[in-house]
Amino acid sequence: MSSELVDALVLLEKEKGISREVIMDAMEAALISAYRRNFNQAQNVRIDLNLGAGSMRVFARKEVVDEVFDPRLEISLEDAQRINPNYEVEDVVELEVTPKDFGRIAAQTAKQVVTQRVREAERGIIYSEFIDREEDIMTGIVQRQDSKFIYVSLGKIEAILPTNEQMPNEHYKPHDRIKVFLTKVEKTTKGPQIFVSRTHPGLLKRLFEMEVPEIYDGTVEIKSVAREAGDRSKISVHSENEEVDPVGSCVGPKGTRVQTIVNELKGEKIDIVKWSSDPTVFVANALSPSKVLEVIVNEEDKATTVIVPDYQLSLAIGKRGQNARLAAKLTGWKIDIKSESEAREAGIYPTENSLIKFDDEVEEEDDFRLNTEDFE
């Protein structure tokens, strides 16, 4: 074995991050294949590689038997004991059979096998690295696109951004740097395949974790996220520490924290609301920026009827029902919105036993319902 080959193996270990043991196993398998193919040998053989000495030797493994039927696989007890008197039947004798020109032939034949093994090992390393990043956020560079996918470089591998995971208000160009959410990592015959998203609610959650230290350290918790990517999102937050304002922490000084996220999402509006275990409070908060007069809860059907001022009805429902739809996703409750006059006519408002009431002049309203439009 030449010193150049040894140096190449060491360099391969450093560059690809593949352990020397994996490379050695690949080399041994390749050399056994080369020996059998080029010297028409079917016997069991073992390759002895010594990187330190730079040597390569081939040993034929033969079983000791009383009567030899296949001299390629068997050796008589008499012949074995000539080598070593201690051999007995069923022992295995190793005989060196290294051909004189084995080095040249082996190098030619082994190259393809070694390359394949190294490639497989490299794919395994990449898969192990990215499977741990599933449901995490990464920064990638747009490489190219076709009719179905945009291909985003994540360094060692290209990820796939499908059409239905692309934000409708974004246009991607080669070399654009974008943050993506890793939705799935698959192991295929051609190596790891990574799928990413720009529309997943998890992307919004991870962006807040990156921008808000209180979320990262656990002081503030994200309870739920509802998102219609590229248009509007709602996020509910909570803190066990009464001295910490969870909404204010997410908004940041003069709205800087949330504005950074809005810029990353190309202007997507974000409502940040305070979570509550009381559905009446939580549903009222979730309908931000609309004001709420009363929330009537039906625990059995997990449904609520929300009464809002007449002039706030369209705001509560939102464009194409978006505000109400997002609030329902955020809270997990069905929401039926009625105007004040409609509720009075139906005789369901006001009620003496309602769990909670809101009016147009609730002083603490801004403490639990803020949205990005407040900072435009």
Image (tube, rainbow, N blue to C red):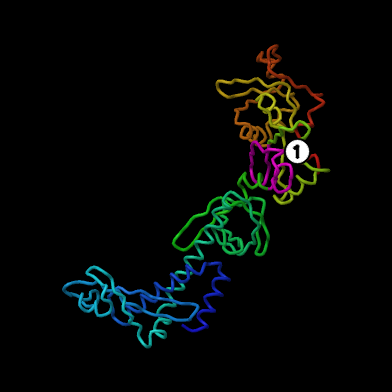
Q: How many marks?
A: 1
Residue located 71% across and 42% down the image:
215
Tell me if mark 1 has few (under 14), some (14-19) or many (20+) residues whose alpha carbon lies within 10 angstroms of its own.
Answer: many
Q: Is residue 364 above or below residue 171?
A: above
* Residue 218 falls in image quadrant: top right
Q: Is residue 67 left or right of residue 209?
A: left
Residue at numbered disc 1:
371
Q: Is residue 28 above or below residue 306?
A: below
Residue located 68% across and 42% down the image:
232
* In-front residue for pair 221/358: 221
Q: Is residue 241 above or below residue 375?
A: above
Residue 201 horizontal/vertical position (percent): 62, 44
Residue 84 horizontal/vertical position (percent): 28, 77
Residue 32 horizontal/vertical position (percent): 36, 75
Residue projecting furthest to the top: 352
Q: Which residues are magenta?
A: 207-235
Q: Is residue 47 above or below residue 134?
A: below
| Kind of residue at disc 1 | Asn
Task: Give the structural element (helix, strand or loop) at label 1.
Answer: strand
Q: Is residue 288 left or right of residue 134?
A: right
Residue projecting furthest to the bottom: 100
* In-front residue for pair 345/128: 128
The answer to if 223 sits in the magenta stretch is yes
Residue 169 horizontal/vertical position (percent): 67, 51
Residue located 74% across and 36% down the image:
246
* In-front residue for pair 164/130: 130
The answer to if 236 sits in the magenta stretch is no
* Quadrant of the snapshot with the C terminus: top right
Q: Is residue 173 left or right of residue 185?
A: right
* In-front residue for pair 302/186: 186
